[in-house]
Image: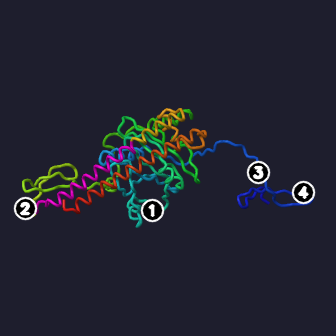
């Protein structure tokens, strides 16, 4: 006979007296403490970590956009691997992974039998590392370690990590997940995480190699610059800003009507961009207001946003929620700008440019 059972969200305890036996509603006496979770499995090697940082540095230099990868673990071999799946990058803090419906990419990566997904990692370009509300939504139902790398333009990066397990987030103890560099084994436990974080935030050595397939999988979602050919020149700049020669002997110049239509589109683009300045400014003001209302410095506010909710008091939770709303608005504006630029370019091309 079980001591406790649950029925329709009510806890029942088994009992027996002189008249009755069975189960009755009860409230178990359980101590109220902060939950914790320790990882005790095999660790990720520094070689894998540096591959990821080298890929992120390369991707940011190439696209000025985010990039992402996934962690995989093999229960039989007890090994960790990372793989950057095909993804679209565009200028800004956005990246979109292309679904591997056929499984061909997993096969190419050698992620066959025995490999299970164990986490994710992405970078925030030159911004600091934190868990955005979008990250939280994407990661909540994916058990494993999730890492954000930030400040790629600085001599030392920033990192933010969290462990998702059964719909809850836990703090990351870096030394539990990564192999300590040689010669540093046996450090006192209270120093291990700080030392490990120090090494994890070091950029990968210059020209550190990572799989060539990762480069192929990063699709730079940019469009060729719009070119209007005249009768006086057959040179133009391509998408990379390089001057190239093109034979225009059979290409007529745009008509006066077409040029007017192009100008109208460009004016609309400029007007739309100007209209967003007020929103961007209001977001900055909002962050200042949040800091003032809760008597928190901006740096501390962003640091709080990286901590699990159960470590914050009621006022801090409210401040973080307000910050996330402002950050979500920023992300939406960035996406709107990208969509507008793409639509304008496609319209210009369709107009005959």
Q: Nearer the viewer, mark 2 or mark 3?
A: 2
Image side of residue 343 versus residue 32, left or right: left
Tell whether position 42 is magenta: no
Question: Image point 49% across, 52% down: which residue?
Answer: 119
Distance between the Cα atoms at labels 3 and 1? 47 Å
Which residue is more in the foreground, 340 or 97? 340
Which residues, given as a range, are shown in magenta?
A: 251-280
Q: Is residue 209 visible?
A: no
Image coordinates of residue 89 in percent, x first then y, are 34, 53
Q: Which of disc 1 and disc 4 is earlier in sequence?
A: 4
Image coordinates of residue 312 in percent, x first then y, are 59, 39
Find disc 2 in the rendering and name its residue.
Answer: 249
Helix, strand or loop at mark 3: loop
Quarter occupied by residue 129: top left
Image coordinates of residue 65 in percent, x first then y, are 35, 48
Image coordinates of residue 239 in percent, x first then y, are 22, 52
Find disc 1 in the rendering and name its residue.
Answer: 112
Q: Nearer the viewer, mark 3 or mark 1?
A: 3
Disc 3 and disc 1 in contact, CB within 8 angstroms? no
Image side of residue 115 versus residue 213, left or right: right
Which mark is on residue 17? 4
Find disc 3 in the rendering and name its residue.
Answer: 27
Local crowd size for mark 1, using a 10 Å CA cut-off: few (<14), some (14–19), many (≥20) = few
């Amino acid at each position: 006979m079980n001591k406790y059972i649950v029925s329709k969200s009510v806890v029942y305890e088994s009992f027996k007296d002189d008249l009755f036996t069975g189960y009755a509603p009860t409230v178990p006496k359980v101590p109220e403490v902060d939950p914790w979770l320790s990882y005790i499995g095999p660790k990720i090697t520094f070689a894998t970590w540096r591959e990821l940082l080298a890929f992120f540095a390369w991707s940011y230099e190439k696209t000025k956009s985010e990039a992402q990868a996934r962690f995989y673990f093999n229960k039989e071999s007890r090994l960790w691997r990372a793989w950057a799946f095909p993804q679209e990058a565009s200028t800004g803090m956005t990246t979109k992974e292309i679904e591997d419906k056929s499984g061909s990419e997993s096969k190419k990566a050698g992620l066959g039998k025995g490999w299970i997904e164990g986490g994710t990692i992405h970078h925030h370009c030159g911004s600091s590392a934190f868990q955005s509300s979008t990250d939280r939504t994407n990661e909540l139902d994916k058990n494993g370690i999730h890492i954000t790398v930030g400040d790629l333009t600085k001599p030392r990066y920033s990192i933010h990590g969290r462990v998702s397990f059964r719909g809850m987030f836990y703090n990351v103890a870096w030394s539990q997940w990564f192999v300590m560099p040689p010669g540093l084994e046996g450090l006192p436990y209270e120093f291990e995480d700080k030392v490990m974080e120090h090494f994890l935030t070091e950029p990968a050595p210059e020209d550190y190699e990572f799989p060539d397939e990762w480069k192929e999988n990063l699709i730079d979602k940019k469009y060729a610059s719009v070119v209007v050919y005249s009768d006086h020149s057959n040179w133009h700049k391509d998408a990379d800003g390089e001057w190239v020669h093109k034979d225009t002997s059979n290409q007529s110049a745009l008509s006066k009507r077409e040029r007017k239509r192009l100008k109208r589109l460009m004016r609309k683009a400029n007007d739309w961009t100007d209209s967003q300045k007020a929103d961007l400014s209001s977001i900055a003001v909002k962050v200042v207001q949040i800091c003032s209302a809760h008597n928190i410095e901006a740096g501390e506010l962003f640091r709080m946003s990286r901590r699990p909710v159960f470590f914050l008091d009621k006022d801090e939770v409210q401040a973080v929620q307000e910050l996330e709303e402002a950050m979500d608005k920023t992300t939406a504006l960035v996406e709107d700008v990208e969509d507008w630029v793409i639509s304008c370019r496609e319209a210009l091309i369709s107009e005959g440019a």
